[in-house]
Image: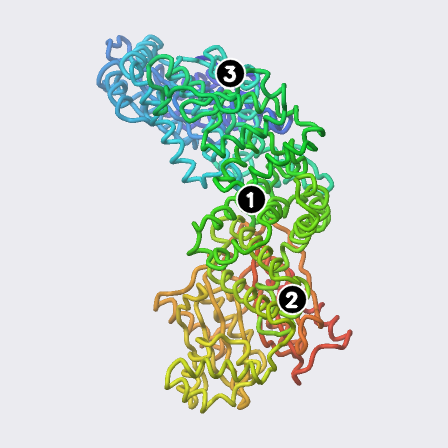
Amino acid sequence: MSVIRIPSPRSVIDRRALVEAIEAVVAETGAAKGRKQVVERLREALENGRAEIARRLVERPSAGHEVAEAQAYLVDQLLRVIHDHVATHVYPAMNRSKGERLSIIAVGGYGRGEMAPHSDVDLAFVTPIKQTAWCEQVIEAMLYFLWDLGLKIGHSSRSVDDMVRMSRSDLTIRTAMLEGRYVWGDQDLYEESRARFWKDVVAGTERQFVVEKLAEREERHKRMGDSRYVVEPNVKEGKGGLRDLHTLYWIGKYIHKVRDPSELVDVGLLTHKEYRAFRRAENFFWAVRCHLHTITRRAEDRLTFDIQREVAARMNYSDRPGKSAVERFMQMFFLQAKMVGTLTGVFLAQLDDQFAKRQPRGLLAGFRARPRTLKGYKVFGGRIMAPGETWFEADPVRLIEIFVIADREGLEIHPETMRLVSRDAALIREEVRRDPRANELFMELLTSRNNPEVALRSFNEAGVFGRFVTEFGRVNAQMQFDMYHHYTVDEHTIRAIGLISRIEKGELKQDHPLSHEIIHKVRSRRALYAAVLLHDIAKGRGGDHSEIGAEIALKLCPRFGLDEEETELVSWLVLHHLILSATAFKRDLSDAKTITDFVALVQSVDRLRQLTLLTIVDIRAVGPGTWNSWKRQLISELYAATEERLRLGHVEFGREKRVAAKKAIVADGASETAALVEELGTQFADAYWIAEPEDVIAKNLAQFHASQEEPLSIATEYYPARGATLVTVIASDHPGLFYRIAGGIHLAGGNIIDARIHTTRTGRAVDNFLVQDPLGRPFMEETQLARLRSSIENALANRIKILPQLVARPDARPRADAFDVRPRVLVDNKASNRLTVVEVNARDRPALLNRLAHALFESKLMVHSAHIATYGERAADTFYVTDLLGAKLTSSSRIKALERRLLEAASEGSLTEVAA
């Protein structure tokens, strides 16, 4: 495509008027003296053009192609004007030799005739032979004009021979030149360079180009997260984005010399319907990319949380019940990315077939294996294929059957057949959904002992999953607008099913020892897989998704063929799928009432096993980094305590017996520890012995003994059992100790994930903190551990003003500003027999825990333990407190005052005000 045609071109840039304005400047002052004025005229034309393009984007916010083409047109015209001005006025050459010829070629995306507002301008300056002085002068002068306009230029200047040689050896240069489009200068030279490119670079290298381009694509996908459904996608480079579409076009162009994507239909690589889907997806992504560049005023291609809402508003998405505008916009984004994945599959299959017809071997090894028949399907080259166009129409249940057979036999579904499957998915109506054979096949796919994740992802991308389980169709490509979930709901669910399968096969024993141990003990694996499938099925409907999901399970499970007991279990698991993690992460597991309440809810060991497995894969499938040894330890602790109580019935050890048993275990560790238990044991209250693990008690006793004469002792060490750093502070107890230590830890760059606060009978505080960095990693280096110690010491000695410094610290995750988390305070006197439990939910930020701890101090409360859980941008901080006399908080007026104070501490404005 050599000429870009756009509507009303002169309203974007009037080249004739610009040329006349520049000639007037030259006539008046000369080219050299008038250079500044010439740049001003060019800049004015560029700014006016950009403003017009931005206006068009506002007027037609989904017209991606039109806006991208207008931007390329604007740059074309500026280049032509600059070239003519330089060649005519700056470096005029009267009798140019054959070598003094220059062709300006647009390459890369610009060569395709599409640009986002702040994209780089990729240019190739081509000369017939090695550059002459005149050519060098013109190129340099043009570049200076372009740089003065603030354009980002990617340029090369080569002779035709150099261009051929470098294109042969470098895939990136070859791809850029493949998109080469004549902009201005010597057109004969451009035609010569094109002919040489096709003859000397492309001819005979088609197969190599395809292989290299697909390898490059795979590498890019890995770099970008290797999923189409990451919740902050890259529009250009991400899986299913613009670059994937362009890869298809490049391959088609390289092999068939197509000049326009529409010609991919003529050469048999796409159908008319698929080409329309190609254009729709490309248009949508271009619109999004143009909005991104316009909003950020730079070449930004990542759709981050803070920008998603604004792009959604600009593209006229609005809220609907249960789904915000931004979630609806992102759902459309992921549906388009999914379509790109489907198009890539069929395109590459067609290509493979074309290569196979040319030569005895195709792109894939073993392509020419002898065909066989399996249950009416054709099987060859590791692929299964429908025998004819009407195969699925004759029996729509086959739309499910083919995926089951492919999974069972380890086959790939031939992309031509996938085309048919996608086309005929609409044949799945109510009678198919109710068909017992169809449901039996579906359950076989869901609970496959082979690779259900791969099978279900393919089932989903073909559009059959959402048709057969319409409730799943509703969460297809649905994002959750928060910083906790990394994937769309359907992708998260399919990943969780894949994890259950891998645990069952024994592949994740190291990561999930508890799951590995209990998975083969569950009474119904069908119920477990069904619960994983349905746990988030009601997301985006408004209301509590657990409650709505439990009702959906009661309706769907009998249809799937589960019996009454399994159905009831699945419904219960979906209803309570968040309770185990909430108890483990936000409650004190050493408090007997925590376990009593949890046992009363769970009621059976089988339910406990099922719920534990569901919880673990749910957390792990949220995204990279959400599962860690700290969470594993807490879940294992809760599981062990609950399982023991369920097994032994309600025969609970008396408090004295539990303390005596713990002391005996600690004393067994080493002779010096046994002596310390004997000497110091009575100074520590019963609650201490019940709450702390044996290894921590041994460390505490040694530190306590060594520091009896010292006013302050701070110990820091890497604690591998919890994947965190253990910080122990021993000091004279006084009100405000907790909030000062917390401030010191935060100022050293640490996040507290758990805290236990104890006071000995002699009035000494023994406080244990588990600390990680903002990315969930422990402090391990001695310099980091020393920094923690000195920061806590400074905070306790009042040498630093904690709050102003905390507020001044940059947020480790500034993107959290995109989310509005309304603070909430819950005061619960039923969760513990001896203590009042206070839970605060708010937006996570550096000064939060310190402010909350300070508010508790101001409310004259003693903190006995603190449990800190973060879910992306949201923090849930739980404190077990009493009044200064050790009693629960019962006065309603005092509870109201506490709630008010904590809400104020948790709200955004209060932090800066107090600091000021």
Mark 3 Cα-neighbour bin, 10 Å: few <14, some 14–19, many ≥20: few
Q: Nearer the viewer, mark 3 or mark 2?
A: 2
User: Label 3, on which residue?
Assistant: 17
* Residue at disc 2, secondary structure: helix
Quadrant (top left, top right, bottom left, bottom right) of the C terminus: bottom right
* Residue at disc 3, secondary structure: helix
* Residue at disc 1, secondary structure: helix
Instruction: Specify the amino acid type for callout 2.
Output: Val
Mark 1 Cα-neighbour bin, 10 Å: few <14, some 14–19, many ≥20: many
Q: Earlier in the sequence, mark 3 or mark 2?
A: 3
Give the distance between the C-alpha atoms of the residues marked 2 and 1, in whole angstroms: 29 Å
User: Label 1, on which residue?
Assistant: 492
What's the colour scheme?
rainbow
Instruction: Specify the amino acid type for callout 1.
Output: His
- Where residue 279 appears, as percent x and y from the top left, is 55, 21
Asked if the residue under mark 1 is in contact with the one under mark 2, i.e. CB atoms within 8 Å, the reply is no
Asked if the residue under mark 2 is in contact with the one under mark 3, i.e. CB atoms within 8 Å, the reply is no
User: Label 2, on which residue?
Assistant: 599
- Where residue 17 appears, as percent x and y from the top left, is 51, 16
Mark 2 Cα-neighbour bin, 10 Å: few <14, some 14–19, many ≥20: many
- Where residue 771 appears, as percent x and y from the top left, is 47, 67
Left/right placement of residue 900 relative to residue 158 reads right
